[in-house]
Amino acid sequence: MELDPALTLTPVEARVLGVLVEKAKTTPDAYPLTLNGLTAGCNQKTSREPVMDLADSDILATIETLRQRNLVVETYGASGRVPRYAHTFAKVYSVPSAAVDLLAVLMLRGPQTVSELRANCERLHHFADTDAVEGYLEELAERESGALVVKLPKQPGSREHRWVHLICGASSEADLLPRAVYAPSGGMTALEARVVKLEEEVADLRAKLELLVGP
């Protein structure tokens, strides 16, 4: 069964929601996010597929459409000065927290194998093993109210299937092609993996610094 059109997102909407889910877990002190924090998260050069270059106006327009669909809520936090944004993904899509984290990583990083998903989700949710990851994916794929993920055919020479989310509609033929980007648990060298990790940590530190110094 296909996903309800009312729950289908545009790629930019999926990016905004994915960032909100991610940062709620990785930088909880800076969450809910300000517009600046959300824009920075959407435009990260690491851990994003595809890389986007969105303006504040793009993010604000997307926030408004997500608010109208009750997927994002606005708050002013303790300062009462700057609006901040939080997601309601789990409630609207009726999925458990661990599944939300898997979907967020798929929305942010594109199609991935079970092993890649387990590694890339580690900062959001610890899965005991790949069987646990696959169990959640199969539940998401078999939902009576509409599948949220699908298993892709194996690529030539690959030992594992990749999974892709369906939140932006049916997967395209492009999802079946080999990727031209690195995945943390794929063919990345040790040095490249360290660079990616450091860039992620810098992005998280910037979000925390913004919280301390204010707008």
Image (spheres, rainbow, N blue to C red):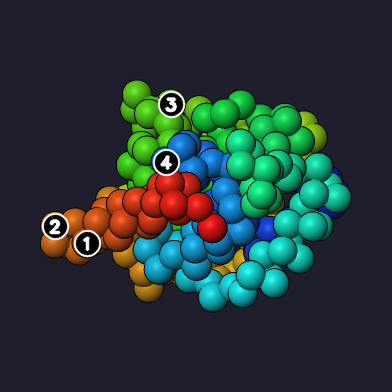
Q: Earlier in the sequence, mark 2 or mark 1?
A: 2
Q: At numbered mark 3, what does the secondary structure look like: helix, strand or loop?
A: helix
Q: Amino acid at mark 2?
A: Ala
Disc 2 to disc 1, how far (Cα)?
9 Å
Q: Earlier in the sequence, mark 3 or mark 2?
A: 3
Q: Which residue does the numbered mark 3 point to in the structure image?
A: 132
Q: Would you say 172 lies left or right of 193 here?
A: right
Q: Residues within 10 Å of mark 4 (few under 14, many from 20)?
A: some
Q: Amino acid at mark 4?
A: Thr
Q: Nearer the viewer, mark 4 or mark 1?
A: 4
Q: Nearer the viewer, mark 2 or mark 1?
A: 1
Q: Where residue 118 sits: x, y (%)?
A: 37, 38
Q: Earlier in the sequence, mark 3 or mark 1?
A: 3
What is the quadrant of the N terminus in the image? top right
Q: Which residue does the numbered mark 1 point to in the structure image?
A: 195
Disc 3 to disc 1, how far (Cα)?
29 Å
Disc 3 to disc 2, how far (Cα)?
27 Å
Q: Which residue does the numbered mark 4 point to in the structure image?
A: 26
Q: Nearer the viewer, mark 3 or mark 2?
A: 2
Q: Amino acid at mark 1?
A: Val
Q: At numbered mark 2, what does the secondary structure look like: helix, strand or loop?
A: helix
Where residue 168 sits, quadrant-wise, is bottom right
Q: Which residue does the numbered mark 2 point to in the structure image?
A: 190
